[in-house]
Amino acid sequence: MTEASRAGGSLPAHIPPALRRLSLPVIASPMFTVSYPELVLAQCKAGIVGSFPALNARQPELLDEWLGQMKEELQGYQRDNPEAIVGPIAVNQIAHTSNVRLEQDVATCIRHKVPVFITSLRAPVKEIVDEVHAYGGIILHDVINLRHAMKALEAGVDGLILVAAGAGGHAGTLSPMALVGEVRKHFKGLVALSGSIATGDAILAAQAMGADFAYMGTRFIASAEANASDEYKQSLLRAGASDIVYSNLFSGVHGNYVRESIERMGLDADNLPVGEKSKMSFADGRSKAKAWKDIWGAGQGVGVIHDLPTTADIVARLRQEYADARARIAALPW
């Protein structure tokens, strides 16, 4: 049951079966070095979509192991808690040409019938789309502008993840209001919105702008289950929106990073060199050179993050904030 159905509404027809029974309209974003099985399982058990990058499994064989273990644990959890809302697992596949594992990782996910694929940096080829669709899976593709969105739709993806200004990690520069509005002129299907979403109020705002789901990452870095160092997590509690730096130095693609981590490396966060997109490589399973392993990605929503609770507590809090925001809006006189 979704919040929409609890409130007496109904979900749009374009929402696929895999995403129709959630505790909140939230897809957790897959975060490099952070989203490991412990966090994914906690997200799914809390009733939202839990996700991770395939490349977080350092070897291809580990991806197969993870998927088998997570599927078994979630099935057992559902069996022991028949009334619980359990969200589906989503796996992020980097479609960049340097990702030499793409074909193997996709085959592994298809063998496990992963319900949701999230593709990034390049639209998936027709063969992947057809194989995922053959067993009822769906593909969501993340984009930062209308041109990328149209290319992805031409490739046959089922939905779009709009990565707007302020999103953690790789992100665009467009206002979420501008990006959602522009995409909705051309596409009436499934849309998730990313960019500084860290509260239940922001989830509702994303829907008010025209998105179906919120796509949230940074809030879950600051959780008990996240595979992030204590220094990383504590930096999020200290940071505000102005402490997030947008740069392409660290991966070749522009993204948002915590100022504190940049300055700890002895760099001037306000005068960073320009990175080279041509050097972006996922050949070793990373989106950034080892020299930058202590540069921490985060979105501008850090300013409203003040603690490190469990994922279950975060989702419970989001649900209450979401309900409060709905009631507040419903009570407005106009």
Image (cartoon, grey):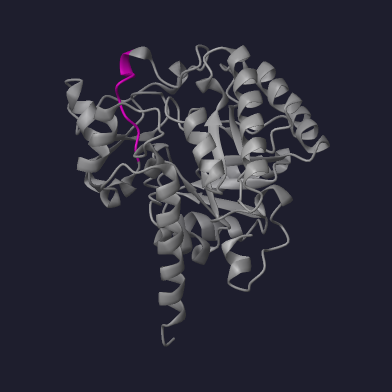
Q: Residue furthest right?
A: 134
Residue 215 position in % (x across, y down)? 50, 47
Q: Which quarter shows the N terminus?
A: bottom right
Residue 297 located within the stretch drawn in magenta: yes
Q: Which residue is rendered at x = 33% and y = 24% of the image? A: 249
Q: Which quarter shows the C terminus?
A: bottom left
Query: Taking the image as drawn, is residue 160 in sight?
Result: yes
Residue 279 position in % (x across, y down)? 44, 16
> Is 201 left or right of 121, judged from the image as shown?
left
Q: Residue furthest bottom?
A: 333
Considering the whole magenta stretch, tell me its main secondary structure: loop
Query: Taking the image as drawn, is residue 167 in sight?
Result: no
> Is 79 left or right of 97, judged from the image as shown?
right
Q: Is residue 222 above or below residue 165?
A: above
Residue 195 located within the stretch drawn in magenta: no
> Which residue is nearer to you in this view: 44 or 274?
44
Q: Is residue 190 above or below residue 324?
A: above
> Which residue is nearer to you in this view: 21 or 270?
21
Residue 311 position in % (x across, y down)? 43, 43
Q: Is residue 66 above or below residue 46?
A: above
Tag count in the figure?
Answer: 0
The quarter of the picture where residue 328 lies is bottom left
Magenta residues span: 291-298
> Which residue is nearer to you in this view: 130 or 200?
200
> Which residue is nearer to you in this view: 267 or 205?
205
Residue 5 position in % (x across, y down)? 63, 67
